[in-house]
Structure formats: structure tokens, C-alpha cells
Image (cartoon, grey):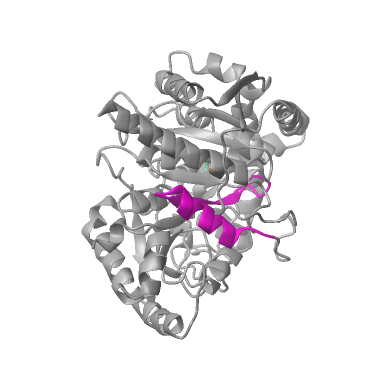
Amino acid sequence: MDITKLSAVEIKQQIKKGTISCVETVQAFLNKIKQFEKYNAILETFDDAIENARIMDKKIKSGFNGKLAGVPIIIKDNILYKNKLCCCGSKFLKNYKAEYNSTVVNKMLSEGAIIIGRANMDEFAMGSSTENSAFGITHNPLDFDRVPGGSSGGSACAVALDMCPIALGTETGGSVRQPASYCGIYGLKPSYGRISRYGVVAFASSLDQVGIFSKTIEDNALMLEVLAGFDENDETSSKTKVEQYTKFENADKLKIGIPNEIIKMIKGMDCENNFFDFINLLKKNGLQIVPVSIKNIELALATYYILAPAEAASNLARFDGVKYTTRNQNAKSLQEIYKKSRSEGFGKEVKRRIMLGNYVLSSGYYDAYYNKAKGVQGLLIEDCLNAFKLCDVLIMPTTVGEAYKIGSKPSDPVETYKEDVFTVTANIVGSPSLSIPFGKGKNKMPLGIQLFGKKFGEKNIYDLALLVEKLVKKEANNAI
Ligand code: GLN
């Protein structure tokens, strides 16, 4: 049996039956990480992983039955795991060790997970390709010359290449769904407030959420069940009841909404035909499709690129060469410590975001940009509330097209920002959205479709995703 091909649910079962041990399991995944080192998905494997697996083997023998008992997990490099490096893909934090566990890490550990490593990412989660990491580019698991997406590209690549069954990423504007789509796996961005952000390095606090990468729907739902819930350490975490996501229900009565504006926006894009194929699949199988409108969706991208940098500029002010970060050794005054340390610590994209953010927040421009963007956010929330009066789940493409070639984006950063056109809305309105692998692009690279739900409507999304998985399989069998 190749353990690395198993899902988390299967690993758990096999360990429980005694067919495999946690130590064997962790070793198998560590070997995979070594084998695929050249993809640069993993920045570090933790040297206590085997020892923790040994302890877990004993615990399981004496009756422990955690939801993730013995399951190896990889976390993005911006999630705190006590005494382990947490660099956020930045050389500024290259020596920073976490002083405490994030809530997500605590929750996984208490359910028996073994955290085996940390994954590469765009610096401070700013980017869509993992080309912005200070620790080198991560490669696409299906084509070495292409990007894996970003900013959680390392986590996505790791899952797609069987380096772990489940990995955590983070989302501010698409950083889990977009790489999931580029790598052909599942990626969930939960509702804002569904998962605690305590111990997750902030990018834009009002948009950030931890997200989940997996190869199966069941694994994704299982992980959300573990991570979701109120946490007194994060005042933005919600008290809304956590549902049993792994208890799947029939989804064929769900009403599926298609925003009219999306149909217009995708004209001529690489994702166009694939999106219509998806709609046809649903129609053919009797699902109810309803047209809806999200009037202001075309403003979402500009709104995001005002709100996210504004919050980032303020969140990143703490990295000053005095606390956390590496300090410039030639600085002679406090001012110089700030200036020199920040100048050499941050990469180009991060500096650009800080400048953008401070610009839109500066007096004179605050009303014209930041306040206006907050207003549009309100309109988008209203649009979505209205759309969800007519349907249960919205669908839209995850990305404009398939993963692009490394280094192929023009020097104009706006061209890269445009890649986020379909993902940012879920973050702006706080909705959950799951990217499911569906179809291929013109170079046979995977594409994704988003199942976008009502706030705290993750259950509907998972139920629908499982149904779609069945329909796709049925279709493939018919084609043979
Ligand atoms: N690509 C987007 C950005 O660069 C989203 C990043 C994210 O979700 N962390 O801002």
C-alpha cells in the first residue's frame, strides 16, 4: 500500500485497524517531501515529527480516538507553531520562532494530528504565484515550468504531490482557492469568523481566514469540523453553531445561482467554455439553476486592492527591526533602524502594498479611496444577500485560466492583480467559497469552479461538492 495516496480519512481508519502505524505514515510522507524537494514547496520539515508520531502510536493503542489521530499535516509559513520558525516567506522574519501555538495548531494537535512541516508562500501572503517568496519559487506539481498559484502555493503543491493529505493555507483574496484550482485539488475559504485567526500572522485582518487544501471533499469537511468554532482569543471569531460537515446530505434540491455579470465578464476568457460545461452538467442532472445578479461585482477587484493594502500597511507597521524581525546592523538611530531594516527586510511587492495602503489612508485621499471602497463593500454585501434570496449556492470560475508560466507576467503588477477577479468577492462579503477541480484549460492544466455560499453556509457547499464529484465520475464512466 502506498500510504501517501490515501486520504486523511483512510489513513485514520488504517491506523485504527493497526494495518499501518503513525510512524510509518509520517515517514512515508517525509520521504515524499524529500523525493519532490526540487518543487520547493516545503521550507522545513519538523525534526520532532517522527517522535510525535511515536507518541501518537502509543496514545492510539491506549484508546485515543481523535478526529485526526495520526494524520500528517503541513501548515503555511504564516501560522504559529510553538518553537518553530515562522517566516511568512520573508527574509525579514527568517529567524523568527513562534512563541505560542495558533488556535488552529492547538485544535489539530488535540485531535491527534502530526504537523510535519511548513510550506512556502508569497511574502506576507501578498501574491498569486508564490514567485514573491524570499525563499525561492515553488513549482506547479503538474508542470514544473508553471506557477502553483499563490499565496499558499507551497501548501497546494504539497497536497497535489502527496506530501501530506491535508494542508492549511490562508486567504485574504483567493490565496487558497486560486492555488487549489491551479494544482487540481480542493481549496476552501471558510466564512469570515468561522475559524480563529489567533496566531496567524495578519495581512488584512477584516478579510483574512485560514483555508483548507485536500484531495477529497470528506477530508476538507473533516478538517473544517476540527478547526471551526468560537475562540475567545479572536474577537472576530463567530459563535454560530458548527455543523457536522462530514454528515453529508442530499444536495439535489439546492438552488444554484449564476450571476448574470459573471457570464458577461468571462466572455473570451480561458475559463469560459469550462464554466458552461459545468452549468450543462448541473442542468443535465436536473439541478435547479437560477439567474441572479451581483450588480457591483465588477468593482470587487478595485475594492479589494484598496482595502487589503490599507489594512496591510497598518498590520505590517509592527515589523520595524526592533521586535520580531532582523535588524540592520549599521543603523545609528531609531529612525535609521526602522528605515534601513524595513528597506532591506521587505521584498518589492510588500513595499508596493505598504505604499499603496498608506496612500489610500492618507488625509485627502481617505474619502476618495478607503471610504469609497468601504461603501462598495456594503453594496456587495447587499447584492449577495439579495442573490441568496433566490438561491442557496452561487457558482463562478475560480480563475481566469490555467496556471501560467513562471516569470511570464509582465512587469506591470496590475496584470497580476487581475488574476484575482473572481476570488476577492467572497473575502469582501465574508462568504465561504470552495474551489473544486473541474475541467482542463488549453494546455491541459486543471481549472476550478467556485461553490460560493451564504455566510456560514459551508454545509450546503460540501453537500453540493460531493454531488458534483459523483456527477463527474458518472460522466467519465459514460464516456468510456
Ligand atoms: N492575490 C491576492 C493578493 O495578492 C490574494 C492574496 C491572499 O489571499 N493572501 O492580495
Taking the image as shown, residue 342 lies to the left or right of residue 9, namely: right
426 in the magenta segment? no
Can you say whether 20 is above or below 444 in the image?
Answer: below
221 in the magenta segment? yes
Q: Position of residue 295 (x, y in %)?
A: 68, 19
Taking the image as shown, residue 407 lies to the left or right of residue 348, namely: left
Q: Is residue 419 visible?
A: yes
Can you say whether 233 is above or below 431 in the image?
Answer: below
Quadrant hosting residue 53: bottom left
Identified at 65% across, 40% down, the residue is 431
Taking the image as shown, residue 463 lies to the left or right of residue 137, namely: right
Q: Position of residue 132 (x, y in %)?
A: 41, 45
Quarter occupied by the C terminus: top left
Taking the image as shown, residue 143 lies to the left or right of residue 386, namely: left
Can you say whether 234 is above or below 171 in the image?
Answer: below
Q: Is residue 343 visible?
A: no
Farthest left residue? 35
Q: Position of residue 31 (x, y in %)?
A: 24, 65
Q: Position of residue 98 (x, y in %)?
A: 53, 70
Tally of numbered discs: 0
Quarter occupied by the N terminus: bottom left
Give, as a single range, the part of the protein colored magenta. 203-229
Q: Nearer the viewer, residue 338 or 369?
A: 369
